[in-house]
Amino acid sequence: MADQTLFTWSAPLRPFKKRSTTLLRFFLAVALLISAVVFFFGDLVTVVPIWALLFLFYIFAITPPPIIENRITVFGVETAGVMLRWDALSHYYFDERLGYRLVVLVTHGPYYAHSYLVMPDEDTRIKVSKILNQHLMCLTNPPKTFTDKIIRFLYGLIPEERPSFSEGPRNTV
């Protein structure tokens, strides 16, 4: 029996950007402010999800993702131990998040589940694109779902991190 793997590459499980303690303090302050407002309105149950989201953001901000092996086989795409069969996939497109190039695989309706695979370099992206074009349709301008719009909006709310004055050379006169 011949090998059924068409292409394999290793990449992080998700896009990752190391965050500074300043940004983490900003989100802690926002969570405290929102919790205080919710507390004074008497809705104590809502405070728990606020702090759970803060904890989740903290974990994702400080923990780098593991490196996984992605495989394209004659049956479909395998990523993180999950096989996405060709007959379950509808189309794919490329996206960019946190400086990483991603290939997004979309399943058929009614759920339209998305799988995000990190492309480590341009050569890998070209090889993956050639193989995926044989089985799936590539969308150059994919429709943005409600979730995509919310994610883009929330990314826009995160303040840009500027290098502090302590970083880099100083000019002394």
Image: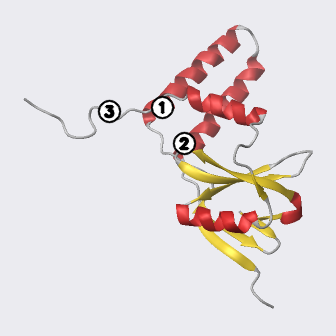
Q: Earlier in the sequence, mark 1 or mark 3?
A: 1
Local packing at callout 2 (Cα closer than 10 Å; few below 14, some 14-19, many 20+) is some
Name the one closer to the observer, 65 or 163: 163
Which of marks 3 and 2 precedes in the sequence?
2
Label 1: which residue?
23
Q: Is residue 83 left or right of residue 173?
A: right
Q: Is residue 67 visible?
A: no
Point 77% across, 81% down: residue = 4
How far apart in space, not on screen, are marks 1 and 2 (Cα)?
10 Å
Q: Residue furthest left?
A: 173
For disc 3, the marked residue is 164
Res. 130 visible in picture: yes
Quadrant hosting residue 88 = bottom right
User: In 3D space, how far apart are the residues under numbered discs 2 and 3 (Cα atoms)?
Assistant: 19 Å
Disc assigned to residue 76: none
Return the disc, 1 or 2, that comes first in the chain's sequence.
1
